[in-house]
């Protein structure tokens, strides 16, 4: 059996500075310390700790497989420790996403978001991880469609014979707890029929059809469905593999030339524009947003992130580029347009989504005063 490499990105809102704005240094340091130790002990081969807004992100590359309990335990312990520190510092929302204290081998279903991908390393394997704050899992549906199914966006679908067979998409129905696999280009219309409903149908995996090569994997957590009420965003993460018979890095990034609307933003109750940013700007401000997204590129090499001469993982901060200035400008313009509408739909989410917020409590107060007409 050839050796396999696993990329795990596990994230959690453990508490933040100045409201839901940003993960401060002391919490990031706990992530650094624990992952460094795990590397020294040989559990993981490399790591990168970062944040997008108020979410602490643990990127780990190892050889233990996607659902390894030791890896999940490492993430869980790190989030617990960071949440305790947040509590001590009286940071805001300490332990926000640690919804259930019932760890038994996996963080899935307990609050943190998880994306994992186990691969057989190719001769050279470029990987991009995406992470977003103040939005929800379905926010990758549109770009994933563009990347792997839209020939007007990914030139390789037309030009590269290795992609001619198309791609298969696994879609999770977050409401019914079911999943289905749909193949493109043959079932493109059916795919769009489903994933256009971004709050319910979420693309969880993508494979190249001709050989079932895994090429994308995303988180599908819906915190409100775990908790039964609004408890914060399901700020999503996603891993994409690129090049050599897969969409090129530039094709993976092309859909982000323009901003688009996603569910989340203030109080998880509004449509808001995605703003692709570099790590230094991955902090939410205006109306607790606009929703930020980062894209980090790296190469996997012998079970690790390819590193420089000092042993530091080499990470490319892909959205920290003037090429995404247009999308950022559009995001600001869309934000202004939507906020002009205040609490009127469609700036605010649909009534079905608002069910999970505190809005029904407000309406409840008027219940007795309604008279038949
Ligand atoms: C939470 C979030 C925020 C909050 C908002 C109100 O992830 O993104 O938009 O929903 O700041 O927060 P509370 O109710 O904690 O004052
Ligand atoms: Mg928060
Ligand atoms: Mg968040």
Image: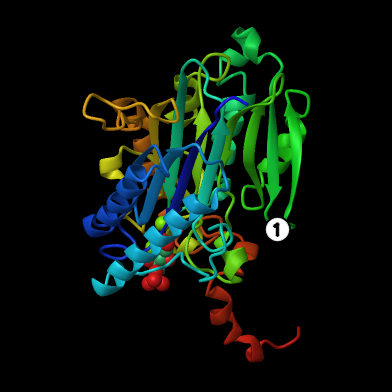
Query: What's the residue at 51%, 40% (across, down)?
Result: 238
- Disc 1, SS: loop
Q: Visible in this render: residue 283?
A: no
> Quick check: 345 left or right of 14?
right
- Residue 20 drawn at (x, y percent): 34, 62
The location of residue 311, given as percent across then percent down, is: 26, 30
The image's colouring method is: rainbow
On screen, 91 above or below 67? below
Pick the front one: 99 or 252:
99
From the top left corner, tell me how far across and down residue 143 is, in percent.
54, 34
243 relative position to 15: left or right: right
Number of labels in the image equals 1
Q: Quadrant of the C terminus?
A: bottom right
Q: Residue at x 31, y 58 (%)?
A: 21
Quarter of the figure with the N terminus? top right
For this rendering, which residue is in front, 14 or 303?
Answer: 303
Ligand 1 sits in which quadrant?
A: bottom left
Q: Is residue 81 above or below residue 116?
A: below
- Displayed quadrant of residue 91: bottom left
Local packing at callout 1 (Cα closer than 10 Å; few below 14, some 14-19, many 20+) is: few
Residue found at x 33% / y 63%: 82
* The CB of the residue at mark 1 lies under 8 Å from ligand 1: no
Camera-side residue: 259 or 163? 163
Residue tagged 1 = 175
Expressed as whole percent of the image width and height from the top left, the position of residue 175 reads: 70, 58
Q: Is residue 126 left or right of residue 226?
A: left
Q: Is residue 281 above or below residue 363?
A: above
């Amino acid at each position: 059996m050839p050796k396999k490499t696993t990329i795990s990105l596990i994230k959690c809102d453990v508490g933040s500075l100045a409201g839901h704005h940003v993960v401060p240094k002391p919490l990031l340091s706990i992530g650094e310390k624990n992952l460094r130790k795990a590397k020294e002990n040989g559990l993981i081969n490399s790591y990168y700790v970062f944040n997008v807004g108020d979410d602490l992100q643990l990127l780990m590359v190892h050889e233990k497989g996607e659902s390894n309990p030791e890896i999940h335990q490492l993430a869980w312990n790190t989030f617990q420790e960071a949440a305790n520190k947040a509590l001590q510092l009286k940071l805001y929302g300490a332990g926000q996403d640690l919804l259930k204290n019932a760890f038994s081998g996996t963080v899935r279903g307990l609050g943190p978001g998880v994306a994992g991908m186990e691969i057989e390393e190719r001769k050279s394997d470029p990987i991009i991880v995406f992470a977003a704050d103040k939005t929800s899992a379905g926010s990758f549906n549109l770009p994933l469609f563009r990347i792997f199914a839209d020939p007007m966006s990914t030139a390789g679908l037309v030009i590269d014979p290795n992609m001619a067979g198309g791609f298969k998409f696994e879609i999770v129905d977050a409401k019914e707890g079911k999943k289905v696999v749909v193949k493109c280009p043959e079932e493109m219309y059916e795919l769009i029929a489903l994933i256009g409903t971004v709050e319910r149908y979420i693309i969880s995996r993508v494979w190249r059809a001709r050989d079932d090569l895994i090429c994308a994997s995303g988180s599908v957590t819906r915190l409100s469905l775990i908790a039964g009420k609004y408890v914060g965003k399901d700020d999503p993460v996603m891993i994409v593999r690129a090049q050599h018979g897969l969409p090129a890095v530039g094709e993976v990034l092309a859909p982000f030339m323009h901003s688009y609307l996603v569910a989340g933003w203030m109080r998880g109750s509004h449509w808001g524009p995605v703003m692709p940013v570099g790590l230094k700007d991955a902090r939410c401000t205006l109306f607790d947003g606009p929703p930020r997204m980062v894209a980090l590129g790296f190469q996997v090499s012998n079970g690790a992130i390819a590193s420089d001469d000092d042993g530091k993982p080499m990470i490319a901060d892909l959205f920290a580029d003037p090429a995404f200035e247009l999308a950022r400008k559009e995001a600001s313009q869309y934000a202004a347009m939507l906020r002009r509408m205040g609490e009127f739909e469609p700036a605010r989410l649909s009534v079905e989504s608002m069910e999970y917020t505190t809005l029904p409590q407000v309406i409840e107060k008027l219940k007795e005063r309604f008279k038949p007409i």
